[in-house]
Amino acid sequence: MLTIDDTHHLPAQDSAASQVTFQFLDGVERQIQVSPGQTILDAAKSNDIRLVHQCKTGSCGTCVAKVLCGDVRMSTERGTSLFPSEHAEGLRLTCSSFADTDCVLGLDYASTLLDEPAPALVQSVVTGKEWVAPNVVKLTLALPCDVDFEFRSGQYVRIRVPGTDAWRSYSMASSTHDLPAVTLLLRVLDEGMMSNYLRKSCAVGDELELEGPYGTFYWRPSKAAHILIAGGTGLAPMLAMLDDISVLSGKKPKVLLSFGCATADNLFCLDELDVRAALLPNLALRVSVSSPDGTYGGLVGNPVSVIAAEDIVDPETVAYLCGPPAMIESARRHLEDIGVKRDNIHAEQFSASAE
Ligand SMILES: Cc1cc2nc3c(=O)[nH]c(=O)nc-3n(C[C@H](O)[C@H](O)[C@H](O)COP(=O)(O)OP(=O)(O)OC[C@H]3O[C@@H](n4cnc5c(N)ncnc54)[C@H](O)[C@@H]3O)c2cc1C
Ligand code: FES
C-alpha cells in the first residue's frame, strides 16, 4: 500500500484529539488529528487535505466516507441526506461528523482527484434549449474557449439561477469530446427557482454562471459488465459515460442501461440512446414506464424492478445509479440482493438543494 507520511502536518498532540486515517481508493493513506467538536471535514482542511465536499450542511451527500473502524458520530443538529440504512452500513458525512475515537475512513475516490485543478467559475452562453419531454429541457451551453475545463464523464456542474444567489447542481450529459459545449438535461418542476427560470424566461443567448466540475460519480474505466440505472433526468451522466465507453480501446464491456420515467410521454432522448446502441453493439437498452396509459406497449415497471438476477452475468459487475434518492436506495438494495458487490456500486442522487 502506498502511504504518504503526513506526520509533519499533524498539530501538537492533543490528548483528547482522535487520530483519523483517510484511505483513498488508490491505496494512499493520510492521517490527521481531529479535536473534539471539530468536524472531520474542517480538520482535513486545516491539515491541507482537500476532501470532496460542497454544501457543508449535510444536504448534498458529496462528502460521504465509510467508517472502516472506530466511532464516528453524526451531528444531531443538522439534517442529513443519508438514509438510515446507509448510516447503519457505516457511511458518514464528513462535514457533519465527529471522531469519538481513533478511526479509519474509506473514501470512494483516488487521492489524485485532490490534485486536480479546483473547480472553475465561468460565464457560459445558452446555445440551445429544447423541450425533449413535457417536463424536461435539454440545454446546451457554450463555455469560453480559453478556459481549461477538464472533467470526468458523470460529474456535475453548478449553475447560478439568473438574478439570484441560488445555485443548482446538474450532471453533464456530454463528455470532454464535446467541449467547449456542455449539455444538461433538466427536469422542470411545477414550482422551483431554476424550473421557473427555465419555463418562463430562459432563451438562447442567455448568459449563465457555471461552476465545476464537481463530484465523485464518474466512470471508472473497466472491462467488467456494467449496469447503469437511470431514473428520469438521471439519464444525463449515463449518456456521457456511454460516450466514454464507446471510445474505449479494444473489446468493449457489456453494458445494460435501464432507463425509466413515470409515463410514456415523459420519456426522452430515446433517439440519442439508439445512436449509442448503434455505436456500441454490447449495449442493451431497457426502457420502462411505471404508470402506462392505454396506448403504451412497452416495458412496465421502474428502472430498478426490471433488473433481474439473470442480468448479473459477471461476478465483477459494476453498477452506476443516478436519479431521485428513493430510487438510489432501492437500487442499491436490489443490486446487492442479486449479487452485485457493494463496493462496485456507484451512485449520484438528485437531492433537492438546501439553498
Ligand atoms: C449532484 C446533483 C446533480 C443533479 N443533477 C441534476 C440533473 O442532471 N438534472 C436534473 O433535473 N436535476 C438534477 N439535480 C437536481 C437539481 O439540482 C435541482 O434540485 C432541481 O433542478 C430543482 O431545482 P429548482 O430550483 O427548480 O427547485 P427548488 O427551488 O430547488 O425547489 C422547489 C421545490 O421542489 C422540490 N424539489 C427540489 N428538487 C427536487 C427534485 N430533484 N425532485 C423533486 N422535488 C424537488 C423542493 O423540495 C422544493 O419544494 C441534481 C442534484 C444534485 C445534488
Ligand atoms: S458537503 Fe457534506 S453533505 Fe454536502
Image (cartoon, rainbow, N blue to C red):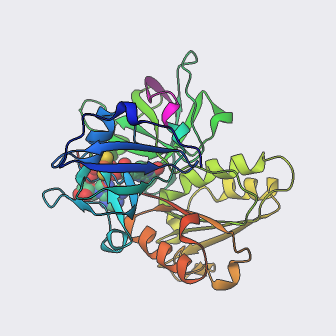
Q: Residue at x 78, y 47 (%)?
A: 248
Magenta stretch: residue 52 in it?
Answer: no
Q: Position of residue 353 (x, y in %)?
A: 29, 50
Residue 172 or 141: which is nearer the viewer? 172
Q: Residue at x 36, y 31 (%)?
A: 9
Drawn side of residue 331 relative to residue 13, left or right: right
Residue 186 or 224: which is nearer the viewer? 224
Q: Is residue 320 above or below residue 182?
A: below
Residue 324 or 150: which is nearer the viewer? 150
Q: Position of residue 88 (x, y in %)?
A: 33, 73
Drawn side of residue 195 relative to residue 322, left or right: left
Drawn side of residue 68 relative to residue 88, left or right: right
The quarter holding residue 325 reads bottom left
Residue 266 or 322: which is nearer the viewer? 322
Q: Quadrant of the C terminus?
A: top left
Count of marks overlaid on the render? 0
Q: Is residue 3 above or below residue 123?
A: below
Magenta stretch: residue 122 in it?
Answer: yes
Q: Residue at x 45, y 68 (%)?
A: 328
Q: Residue reaching furthest right?
A: 250
Q: Residue reaching furthest top?
A: 146
Q: Is residue 229 visible?
A: no
Q: Position of residue 178 (x, y in %)?
A: 65, 34
Q: Position of residue 104 (x, y in %)?
A: 39, 56
Q: Is residue 236 visible?
A: yes
Q: Is residue 309 above or below residue 322?
A: below
Q: Residue at x 54, y 73 (%)?
A: 303
The magenta-colored residue range is 114-127
Q: Residue reaching furthest left?
A: 77
